[in-house]
Amino acid sequence: MKSKIYSSEYIKNSSKGQRWIPAFAMIAFLLAFPVAELILMGKWNERSYTQSQLAYLYSSLWSSDFLTMGAIVAAVTAFLAAVSGFWYLYSPRKVDFYHSLPVRRSALFLHRVLLAVIYYLIPYIIMEFVAVCIGAARGYYSLSIMKKALILLVIHLLMYLLVYFSTVLVIACTGTMLMGALAWAGLFIYSIVLAVMLQISGHLFFDTWYEGSYGILAAVRDQGSPLMVIVSFIDKYSSGSFGKQLLILILTLFIMAALSWMAFCRRRSENTGKALVYTWMEPVLSALITIPSGLGIGLIFYMIPEDSSKTAWWIFGMILGTILVHGILEVIYEMDFHRFFRRKVQLMIFGGFVAICALTMKMDLLRYDSYFPAYDNLQGVVVNVCNLSYTEQLCNVEKKKTESIRSGILLHQTIVPVCWISR
């Protein structure tokens, strides 16, 4: 039985109810590659570009436009393939049926992954080959284009597998559709929301806050979720320096693949129907959601008033947000409104963390505003200049190899906050 699940006949039979996935991928890649290519070529011909300019535009098409459009189609196809392949985990009856078969779960997992890769690769290769043939018919064929097409195939496959395994991980760890949808959204956008909240907090509480993204904040925003790993790679690939980001993409892919495989193989069938199959994840997710939510709702109340009552409203917002979010999560876990005030001790602990974080920002316990780096570690200075119209200008001051400081021109002689950027 173990060898038969990888046979072509069994793959053909097991894919009867999922043939809409490659059909969708075929249509989507048709629009992303050949159709988009023909539309862009038509626009180029209307603008009377020279032959060298057209060759440059066609080459950049494989480095930027096809990369972005193919990544979007690959992500959507990966989500649909993962949901279609592992949707049965939300049904106790189907779980009992599939997991009673004389097949190891690891073999069943690999079989579904193999099907998902086949569903993706066949439409992709066909449509990309058609796109190459269209370019060759217009006189743009070269070995460099073939190389870019091959590289694009590998990159999109990595992105596809990253989204696929991330979605499988969420399905394998959750037992209900509601919790699965919330967990999937949190996995992909949690770091974005957290980075925005940190930026707003720094702007409100620190005089020398630098509006740009660097250090821990940049890592949280750019590497904190599978979505942002893909977006960051696309941005770096367009600029040409994508080696480090490619390693991060591959490493994230391997982590998600290993976690999804373990979550699927160790999943207990009797826990199907619970919000989270692994109960130890409940306090972890509650902490990751409740604490930032309490701080974020507090910031909303802090920004509303313009008088001295800001602090009082801030405290009220943090208390309200912490209690409200923690209660909603408990209701989702148990699917019972009577559980809103369950785990009061845990709620008090989370409230204490919220208070510590708020006090740290308000009183600058980390000494952010008073930080002054050593000269050897100094890379640049950002000066925030405020003119009479209350508009802000940023003057970047960079350190050169000659151990001197090069600055811009300051238009106003005003005492202004300074942000030091160190290595």
Image (cartoon, grey):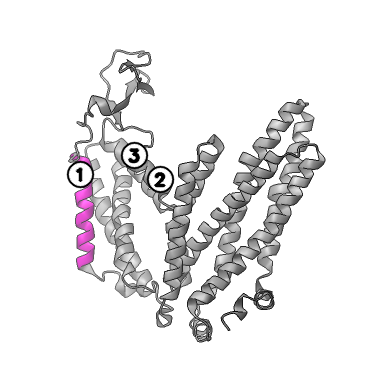
Residue at (46% x, 59% y) in the render: 254
Q: Which residue is drawn at 69% across and 55% down?
A: 125
| Quarter where residue 137 is shown | top right
Relative vertical location of residue 239 with respect to residue 188 in this rendering, above or below: above
**Whole-number angstrom distance, CA of label 2 to CA of label 1:** 21 Å
Disc ID at residue 360: 1
Under tag 1, what secondary structure? helix
Q: Which mark is in front, 1 or 3? A: 3
Q: Position of residue 22 (x, y in %)?
A: 68, 64
Q: Which amino acid does label 1 sit on?
A: Thr
Q: Where is residue 59, by image quadrant?
A: top right
Q: Nearer the viewer, mark 2 or mark 3?
A: 3
Asked whether residue 348 is drawn in magenta, I would say: yes
Q: Earlier in the sequence, mark 1 or mark 3?
A: 3
Q: Which mark is residue 37?
A: none
Closer to the chain start, of discs 2 and 3, is 3
In the picture provided, is 181 more to the left or to the right than 137?
left
Residue 215's tag is: 3
Residue position for label 2: 221
| Magenta stretch secondary structure, dominant | helix
The answer to whether one can see residue 251 in this image is yes
- Give how far across and how far down residue 46 sits, in percent: 79, 30
Q: What stretch is highlighted in magenta?
A: 345-363
Does 71 sit left or right of 344 as displayed? right
Residue 15: x and y in percent read 66, 73
Q: Distance between the residues labelled 2 and 3?
A: 10 Å
Q: Decide: marks 2, 1 in contact (CB < 8 A)?
A: no
Query: Could you say which quadrant of the image residue 174 lies in?
Result: bottom left
As drawn, 379 above or below 242: above
Marks 1 and 3, Cα distance to the nearest angstrom?
A: 19 Å
